[in-house]
Image (cartoon, rainbow, N blue to C red):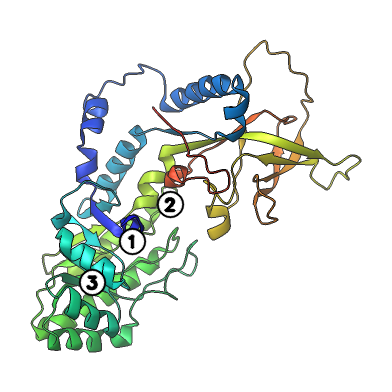
Amino acid sequence: MVAFQPYFYFPLSDLSTSHHCKSRYGISKSPFGPISADEVVDNLIRKHTGELSNDRYRSQSDHPSVADSSRIVEQDLRWKSSLPDIEPFYAWALVDPSRIIFAHPCKSISALHFAAKQGICWTTFDNIDELEKVKQHSPQIGLLLRIFAEDDGAKVCLGDKVGAPWNTTIALLERARQLDLKIVGVSFHIGSGASDPESFTTAIHQARRVFDQGEPLGFDMAVLDVRGGFQHTNFAFMASSLRPALAREFGDRPIRVIAEPGRFYATPCYTLVCKVIARRTHIGAAPSNPAGMLYQNDGLYGCVSCGWSEGEEYTPVLVKQNEGRDDHRESREHRYSFWGPTCDRIDRIAKEVVMDGEVKVGDWLVYKDMGELCRTNDVFSLHDVGIIPV
């Protein structure tokens, strides 16, 4: 059942009105007074790393992250301001299954049985074989046709694995009609970390085409799932294309529009903290080459896995040392490459980073905007990632 969880989504409104968010952010006055959220996070990091440094064993293996839930509230306000008519769904547990969408178009039979047993009402499909499977094992479930959509510049393109080509949608709808299945809407995903707003425009146009194909077949299609692709760094730019496209294509009919913007909500909420566990200094290195290699206690097999799957490179920041610490180090600029703790040559976090000063073994590094990856278990060291709530 754990393997299914990443594809179950429910309305984010359930999360933003949870007991935690209400008790913490239901009052406009900040519990930290004039201190900014960034300062609170920095203070927590300094306090926690100081405590860990006194524990010789834990400090070598622990790589905690700071979770600032106020960022979720901020992101939700941004979402509602730019896309007020699109309901965000988010992967979570402990929610009424009747409000969940099982958003995987190619499911195992056991997954379908599990969804049916739990009372999940919606799922997606993109091929005839899936329709036959649904007919046999979960014929009562509502179906969203997952169509092809892609932003060629996305960090993760999904079109080569999922999504019905546009010239196959009518055949899929006709087969669903023959099988007496219930088509409730259309779904698409332009790719994780998208950057081209025209990808949304094209996908929404094709979605409207599928709605028009389904109507003569007797389907009551009233749901459009635009899924993900949203980044917090270019959100306004992407949203500026999405809203007019929806108004243009669906302004003449009432539909429910939902999205699954997990990356957008989660990315700014988590800050990862890692410890430098080893250093290789290149004696006599040429000025054009990095001064040395730094090894930290987390890498591509843990919370920094996007460096592997998406080619992401990260820029760490050195945690400021406590004033008065007897710590002699060179203050000039140093260039380092950063590596994870494994022996794998691909376990590299950053090829070259210019640091303001020398970095030593035992120092702590901060990675901001790490998102939900900070909840990952470190499969190499087998240590759970500690979450420090703000």
- Per the image, the residue denoted by label 2 is 234
Regarding residue 190, the answer to whether it shows in the image is yes
Residue drawn at 14 percent across, 85 percent down: 179
Amino acid type, mark 3:
Val
Above-or-below relation of 237 to 143: above
Q: Is residue 8 left or right of residue 235?
A: left
Residue named by callout 1: 241
Q: Label 3: state its secondary structure.
A: strand
- Report the mark closest to the observer, 1 or 3: 3
Q: Quadrant of residue 245?
A: bottom left
Quadrant position of the N terminus in the picture = bottom left
Query: Residue 269, percent across and down?
Result: 41, 38
Query: Does the CB distance between marks 2 and 3 fall below 8 Å?
Result: no
Residue shown at 86%/43% (left/top)? Answer: 287
Count residues near mark 3 (Cα–Cα under 10 Å), then give few for <14, some for 14-19, many for 20+.
Answer: many
Give the number of the mark in front: 1 or 2: 2
Q: Is residue 167 above or below residue 204?
A: below
Q: Which mark is residue 189?
A: none
Nearest to the observer: residue 61 or residue 43: 61
Local crowd at mark 2 within 10 Å, few (<14), some, or many (≥20)?
Answer: some
Q: Amino acid at mark 2?
A: Asn
Q: Earlier in the sequence, mark 2 or mark 3?
A: 3
Report if the CB atoms under discs 1 and 2 are less than 8 Å apart: no
30 and 299: which is toward the camera: 299
Q: In front here: 348 or 150?
A: 348
